[in-house]
Each structure stands twice: as structure tokens, then as C-alpha cells.
Image (cartoon, rainbow, N blue to C red):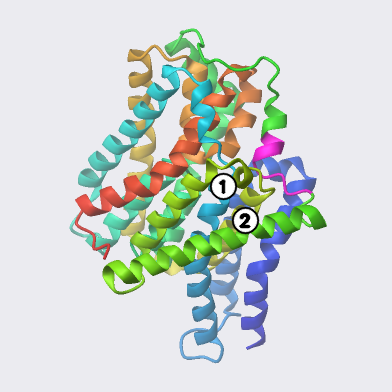
Amino acid sequence: MVSTYLMIAGYFIFPVLIILLFNKYKWAQKIGTVILAYAVGIIIALLNTAFGFLPSAGEGGAELLTSVQKNLMSVCVPLAIPLMLFNSDFKLWTKSLPKTLAVLIGGVLSVAIALVAGYYIFRTKDFESAEEFKKVAVMMTGIYTGGTLNFAALGEMVHADPNTISITLAFEEIVTLPFIIFILAGGYKLFRKFLPFKDETSVDDDVDPKAISEGTFENYRGMLKAKTFGKMMLGLLLSIAMLGVGVGLSILIVGKINELVVILTITTLAIIASFSKKVRELPKTFELGMFFILIFSVVVASMFDLTKIDSSSLTIMWYILFVMVTSIVLHLLFCRAAKVSGDLFSVGHISLLCSPPFVPPVVEALGNKKVLISGIAIGLVGYALGTYLGSLFATLLGLPLF
């Protein structure tokens, strides 16, 4: 029982430690909080596989640990979605030109085509569960149109097995990380050669990428200051209220709590609320939402079972690699047809693939702040679109959502 209580405490302590590392060390900032959280969870899972310090089914404390894990997974994501959308200024689109819209549409279409084609190529008769592979495809729709937030929401929505979630996210990070490093290390020069077009994005020349990054995404400093903390808690209360509305509508519509109705309701309400200046200016709501995502990431990764990796799991890896490469190639072709610049393509694809917090570092590597606003705007719309697109894909694949 002691190990159970320690593990439950760890689900809250580890995200705090990760945030402290993120605030203090540049290497942690480059890796990213979500990847760090997931790495912590994987390490816990591997140590448990080797030494068995957590109770297994039938042992004392196992039922409590499982209950806590399920509850955290069910609550963290619905609370995080509104909090992370409140600060989103969707009116950034008024500062962007049609090229930004071309990058967004091209990116979403490229991902959709790659996901559908890959699904029919890699779905095999020997896959352990055809239903579970459909869930992988749906979750990938979310992660490639907004990042981990949508991935987690869709995983909850389709009731994906925690180990499937862990394996999918692990392989996705293994495939995606080299691409991010490639761009930051100068790979964007290849995109500039393939897309040698002029940037037409309008943005104030005085915009500082670091200022926007520190003011909008993952700046955890000052969260506990009395004035900031109080307003941040208002954001949390608003998020809880939206969750309550989602649950109420779900019971009213389908007679029970349904993840699809709940998540789409809170996403829609959060987008509407973000147009209010008072809501948008509530401090640190994005960071608080990220804290809940970090808890979710540690919990899910800690449930990873190495013994369940088999040929079916490797199929997931090849599927993700196919989607990654195919979507990049198709997106490049779309952008060339629309005469989009190489730099705008770079920030747009990274923003859809990894979410807006990754845009400022890429902009700094490019040395071109003209594409900053467009990159962030693409990611924000990706946040908003991800769960809707995933729900549509799940319906087309015949997954039960009600």
C-alpha cells in the first residue's frame, strides 16, 4: 500500500519537478515538458517491469491505484482543454494573409490523406485488435492537428487502451523528434530551396519572438503570486463550469456521460469564451492547463507495459512513420502550388505537428520573425479543429462514440 500512495503522490509531484527543470535549464526547454513527463512515466513503467514495486491485479492497493489512474485520465484532459484555449487569440487571423490559410488547409488535407491512406495500407488481419488500430488512427488525427492536447482528448473519447496510448505516443515522439532537430539544425534551408517564394505575411517589425513565447506559452514563473494565482483560479472555476455544462448536456442528450459530447461541448465553449478580452487576459491559464496535461502524460506513460510490444505494436510505428513522411511531402506540394515560402511552411507544419509553443524556437532558428504570427495562428486553429476532425474520422471508421 505504501508504494501505491507514493505513486499517487508522484503523479502530482513529478509534473511540478518537470516545471522547475523547465524554468531553470535550457536543455529542458529544448526537450519540452510533455516529452519529459512522458519520459518520467516510461522510466517508472520500466522500473516496475524490472522490479515489480507497484501492486499487480489482486494485490493490496492495486484497485486503488487503478481507480486513481482512471479518474486522473478522465478529468485532467477535459479540464486542460478550456484552460489552454482561453488565452488563444483567434483574431490573430486578422493579421495574416491568405498564404497562412493555404498552409493550414494544405496541412490538414495532407494529414487527412496520409492518415486514411496509411490506415488502409497498414491495417492487417494479424493486428491484435482491428478496433484498437482504428483508435490509433483517430488519435493521430488529433496529434497532427494541434499536438498532445488533442491526442489525449481523442484517446479519452474513443476509450483507447492506456497501453495503446502509451505505445502510440512513444513511437510518435521517436519519429517526430528527429524532424524537429532537423529543422532547428538548418534543415529549413532545403524547404527554402523547394519553396523559394517571398514572405507576404504582415506582422509588426517590432514583434519579438521571445516576448510572445514568454508571454503566451509555458512561462510558469509567477504562477503562485497572490494576484496571479487568484485570477488563474477563476480560469479553473470557469473550466470546471464548462465541464459541468458538458456533462449535463451529455446526460440530457444520450442519457449518460459521453466523452464525445463532453469534449466537443467544452471545446466549443472555450473557443467562444476566448473572444472575451477578460477571459483571454486571465493569467497563466495555458500553463495550468499544461500542468494537467503533464499529470495525464505521467499517468499514461507509467501504465506502459513493455511485455505487450509485439508485431502489432511495430505496425503502429510504421504507420506513424508513413503518416509523418507522406504528410510532409504532400504539404510541401500543396505549399509549392500556393507559392508559400519555405519559412512559412516550416513554422506551419511544426505548429500543426507539435502545437504553438514550438513555433518561437523555430522562428528564432529561421531568423525570420515575419512568420511568427502566422505560425502561432495555425497552431491555435489546429487546437480548435483537432477534436472535431478526430470525431469525424472516428465516425467514418465506424467507431462507437455514443
| Nearest to the observer: residue 28 or residue 353 | 353
Q: Position of residue 332 (x, y in %)?
A: 38, 21
| Nearest to the observer: residue 389 or residue 278 | 278
| Nearest to the observer: residue 206 or residue 59 | 206
Label placed on residue 86: 1
Mark 1 closeness class: few <14, some 14–19, many ≥20 residues within 10 Å: many
* Residues shaded magenta: 213-221
Residue occupying the point 67% across, 45% down: 218
Residue occupying the point 57% across, 25% down: 373
**Which residue does the numbered mark 2 point to in the structure image?**
235
Q: Amino acid at mark 1?
A: Phe
Residue occupying the point 55% across, 15% down: 202
Q: Is residue 304 visible?
A: no
Q: Position of residue 270 (x, y in %)?
A: 49, 50
Q: Quadrant of residue 9?
A: bottom right
Q: Quadrant of the C terminus?
A: bottom left
- Number of numbered discs present? 2
Q: Position of residue 310 (x, y in %)?
A: 35, 61
Q: Amino acid at mark 2?
A: Gly
Mark 2 closeness class: few <14, some 14–19, many ≥20 residues within 10 Å: many
Query: Horizontally, is 56 left or right of 323 in the view?
Result: right
Q: Quadrant of the N terminus?
A: bottom right
Query: Horizontally, is 197 left or right of 311 in the view?
Result: right
Query: Are discs 2 and 1 less than 8 Å apart at CB?
Result: yes
